[in-house]
């Protein structure tokens, strides 16, 4: 049996390892969950004993194949529950993360598969993140960050790379929500902000937004 804490650590290591070949440092894990590095080290030993991670003292950790499969399954459940909460229970996209953090630990595989079918097998969650299928395979979503667009380019908002409630609420206030079409009408060299046209209205967005908003051209 695994504790919720152990599953959370596996998920965090998985997220930190995406796109990287290097070992994940315990300090990076501690910073992510805001606890002391010594506490992380204790958990790494436990996960290593269960053969869920490869732990090299003073060097870092990586997930074993078993640990990776568990982490992907947790991510899958989390994102499916977020879709359910938004699409079926009318929660807003900035409200669902903490609830899904609790629901992701439900162990029933049959429930998850029925949930997936009930939702018509979604490929992405309300924030645009890809949902692994039942075999752990992630669909390839060809999105780029808004700050990579050039003046005159058009795109559709498909997701975010920053998931904090404050950020999502700010996007809501600006109307920068999933599915909206935008055109880059001006780029400010001084601070990297952009002028966008959306719904026949022009708005200015900060550099912080442009580097965290995912666009499909």
Image (tube, grey):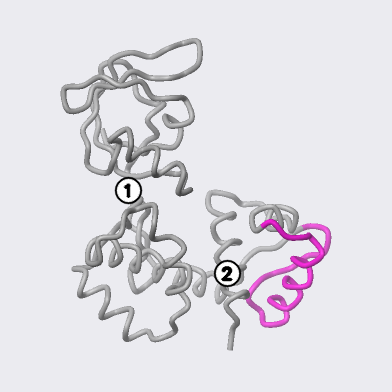
Q: Name the residue that disc number 2 marks.
A: 8
In this picture, is 123 found above or below 55?
A: above
In this picture, is 190 found above or below 163?
A: above
Q: Is 114 left or right of 128, judged from the image as shown?
A: left
The spot of residue 93 in percent (x, y) is 34, 53
Q: Between residues 42 and 59, which one lies in front from this camera angle? A: 42
Q: Between residues 199 and 184, which one lies in front from this camera angle? A: 199
Q: Quadrant of the C terminus?
A: top left
Label 1 and label 2: CA atoms lie apart by 25 Å
The spot of residue 185 in percent (x, y) is 28, 15
The spot of residue 24 in percent (x, y) is 68, 56
The residue drawn where x is 50% and y is 10% is: 190
Q: Is 27 left or right of 140, judged from the image as shown?
A: right
Q: What stretch is highlighted in magenta?
A: 34-59
Q: Name the residue that disc number 1 marks.
A: 141
| Mark 1 surroundings: few (<14), some (14-19) or many (≥20) residues within 10 A | few
In this picture, is 198 found above or below 168?
A: above
Q: Between residues 114 and 202, which one lies in front from this camera angle? A: 202
| Mark 2 surroundings: few (<14), some (14-19) or many (≥20) residues within 10 A | some
43 is within the stretch colored magenta: yes
Precedes in sequence: disc 1 or disc 2: 2
Q: Is 214 left or right of 38, judged from the image as shown?
A: left
In this picture, is 143 found above or below 198?
A: below
The residue drawn where x is 46% and y is 11% is: 189
Q: Element at badge 1?
A: loop
Q: Element at badge 2?
A: helix
98 is within the stretch colored magenta: no
Specify the farthest residue to the left: 200
The residue drawn where x is 74% and y is 65% is: 40
Q: Quadrant of the N terminus?
A: bottom right
């Amino acid at each position: 049996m695994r504790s919720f804490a152990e599953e959370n650590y596996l998920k965090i290591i998985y997220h930190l390892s995406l796109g990287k070949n290097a070992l994940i440092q315990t300090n990076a894990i501690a910073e992510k969950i805001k606890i002391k590095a010594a506490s992380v080290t204790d958990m790494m030993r436990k996960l290593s004993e269960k053969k869920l991670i490869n732990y090299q003292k003073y060097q870092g950790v990586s997930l074993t194949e078993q640990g990776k499969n568990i982490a992907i399954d947790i991510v899958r459940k989390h994102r499916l529950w977020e879709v359910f909460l938004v699409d079926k229970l009318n929660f807003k996209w900035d409200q669902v993360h903490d609830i899904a953090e609790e629901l992701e630990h439900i162990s029933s595989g049959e429930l998850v598969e029925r949930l997936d079918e009930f939702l018509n097998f979604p490929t992405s969650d309300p924030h645009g993140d890809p949902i692994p299928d039942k075999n752990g395979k992630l669909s390839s979503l060809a999105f780029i960050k808004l700050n990579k667009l050039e003046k005159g380019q058009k795109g559709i908002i498909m997701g975010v790379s920053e998931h904090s409630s404050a950020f999502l609420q700010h996007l809501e206030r600006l109307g920068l929500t999933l599915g909206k079409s935008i055109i880059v009408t001006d780029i400010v060299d001084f601070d990297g902000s952009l002028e966008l046209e959306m719904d026949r209205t022009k708005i200015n967005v900060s550099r912080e937004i442009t580097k965290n908003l995912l666009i499909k051209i």
